[in-house]
Image (tube, helix red, strand yellow):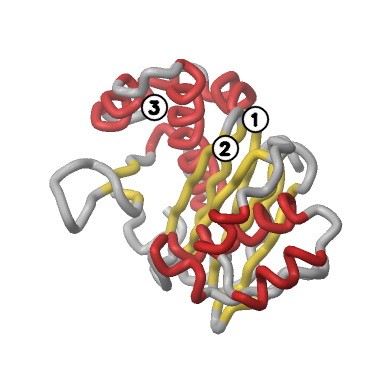
């Protein structure tokens, strides 16, 4: 196995069905804890999204490590309870940071030399819930959203950026409003020592947070 000292990072996104089709026997790839959590979901679409996200993080880490996805074990643990959720890690490469996310019909995953966080959200076309925006955005961000020609899309962009920062451990979901991030412009912003790499804008938007910039690309990109 390659060492993680000079790997950089990798992030992938794909439609749920594409990941499941590429994976083959999904349940043989995942752990019993993962399949049990999937089976507990009532919606078949939610189960597929969950399974695809857990597959994609193995595919992503496997590409970075030069290992087959089936040789990697993803575990999650929570500091507050004994349930198998919380920040994921690889048993075979514990120093490698990994993250994954799913939304309706899409999944994303990232792996990097150090902490990494990824999030993805569907652009559903519904009007912006300003109460949610007020709880998750700073006053400066809210002012920018009110001037934006597409405030819903601009908010989703902020949301995935902030969720990616939550996943690297710099804030909690209750503290999103204190993360004051740039709203305008296509260039990926920074927040303190973290690089934020944006992706999408049609069906979905996504973001990866890491110490070094990691480009989020489609699974079938060369």
Q: Residue at x 46, y 58 (%)?
A: 2
Q: Residues within 10 Å of mark 3 (few under 14, many from 20)?
A: many
- Badge 1 crowding class, 10 Å Cα cut-off, few under 14, some 14 to 19, many 20 or more, is some
The residues bearing labels 3 and 1 have C-alpha atoms spaced at a distance of 18 Å
Pointer 1 or 2: first along the chain: 1
Outermost residue, front direction?
A: 131
Report how far apart the C-alphas of labels 1 and 2 lie in the structure.
6 Å
Is residue 4 something one can see in this rendering?
Answer: no
Q: Mark number for residue 15? A: 1
Residue 195 point in image, percent of width and height = 62, 73
Q: Earlier in the sequence, mark 2 or mark 3?
A: 3
The tag on residue 157 is none
Q: Is residue 49 above or below residue 102?
A: above
Residue 190 higher or lower than 80, as above or below: below
* Quadrant position of the C terminus in the picture: top right
- The quadrant in which residue 36 appears is top left
Label 2 near label 1: C-beta < 8 Å? yes
What residue is shown at x 47% (from left), y 33% (from top)? 55
Q: Which residue is mark 2?
A: 107
Task: Give percent across and percent down for residue 142.
Answer: 66, 68
70, 188: nearer the viewer:
188
Residue 29 badge: 3
Residue lying at 62% horizontally and 45% vertically, measured from the top left: 12
What is the x, y in percent for residue 17? 61, 22
Label 2 residue SS: strand
- Viewer-closest of 39 and 215: 39
Q: Is residue 47 visible?
A: yes
């Amino acid at each position: 196995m390659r060492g993680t000292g000079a790997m950089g990072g990798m992030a992938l996104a794909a439609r749920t069905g594409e990941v499941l089709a590429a994976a083959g026997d999904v349940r043989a790839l995942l752990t019993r804890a993962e399949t049990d959590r999937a089976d507990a979901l009532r919606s078949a679409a939610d189960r597929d999204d969950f399974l695809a996200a857990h597959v994609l993080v193995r595919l992503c880490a496997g590409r970075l490590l030069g290992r087959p996805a089936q040789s990697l074990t993803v575990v999650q643990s929570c500091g507050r309870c004994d349930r198998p959720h919380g920040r994921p890690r690889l048993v075979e490469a514990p120093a490698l940071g990994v993250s994954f996310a799913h939304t309706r019909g899409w999944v994303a995953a990232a792996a990097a030399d150090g902490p990494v966080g990824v999030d993805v959200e569907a652009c559903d076309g519904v009007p912006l819930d300003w109460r949610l925006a007020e709880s998750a955005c700073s006053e400066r961000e809210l002012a920018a959203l009110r001037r934006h020609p597409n405030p819903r899309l601009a908010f989703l962009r902020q949301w995935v950026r902030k969720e990616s920062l939550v996943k690297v451990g710099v804030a909690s979901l209750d503290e999103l409003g204190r993360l004051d991030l740039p709203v305008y412009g296509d260039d990926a912003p920074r927040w303190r020592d973290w690089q934020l790499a944006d992706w999408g804008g049609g069906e979905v938007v996504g973001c990866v947070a890491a110490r070094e910039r990691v480009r989020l690309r489609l699974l079938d990109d060369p």
